[in-house]
Amino acid sequence: MTRPDPADLRVPGDPAMGVAVDRVAYAAVTTDEVSVQRMSSLVQDPRCGALVTFDGVVRDHDEGKGVLLLDYSAHPSAQAVIEEVAAEIAERYADAILALAHRYGPLTVGESALVCAVAAPHRKLAFAACDDLVDTVKKRLPIWKHQRFDDGSDEWVGALG
């Protein structure tokens, strides 16, 4: 999929949104519960007319098997990597404010694992930035999941790639 050039998504006359480092409201790898509501509240801004979220929840199946639970393991560098990814996306999308968190530890079906929120003056930029953020996290964050299935089997899956 080809992403639009973020510069083409800017609307002339929109107010300046500030430097990239100030537009990363939150970036964390945590054992705490994560929620769309919390991430959304962190990016609220009166200059923004669009708020796009992503809630990656544990589903009850994978490749034809029933999933009972997942146990995510994070590399010690995971916090630094998620901060780096957030900074890169904020730099790439100059009008976006973002917040994201990836949970690790045991999670059951229906719980949120990766949550992102992106606010921007307009929807196309917010959608593009959120999509790019999720894809980049999935490619680079050193987190692995141990899936446990209802047939008694299990498998390790790299979250990278």
Image (tube, helix red, strand yellow):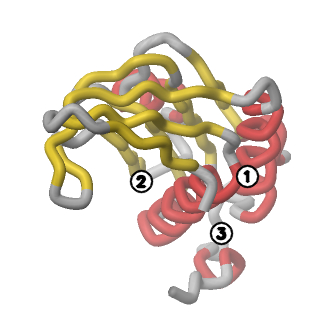
Viewer-closest of 61 and 104: 61
Distance of label 1 from label 3 (alpha carbons): 20 Å
Image-quadrant location for residue 26? top right
Disc marking residue 50: 2
Whole-percent x and y of residue 81? Answer: 78, 40
Question: Residue type at mark 1?
Answer: Ala
Q: Residues within 10 Å of mark 3 (few under 14, many from 20)?
A: few
Q: Tell which tag, 1 or 2, sits nearer the viewer.
A: 1
Kind of element beneath mark 2: strand
Kind of element beneath mark 1: helix
Question: Mark 1 touching mark 3, by CB under 8 A?
Answer: no
Q: Name the residue under label 1.
A: 90
Residue sitting at 63 percent across and 25 percent down?
Answer: 29
Distance of label 3 from label 2 (alpha carbons): 16 Å
Whole-percent x and y of residue 11? Answer: 60, 74
Disc marking residue 13: 3
User: Reading the chain from its start, which is encountered first: label 1 or label 3?
Assistant: 3
Whole-percent x and y of residue 6? Answer: 66, 75
For the view shown, which residue lies furthest in the bottom direction? 2
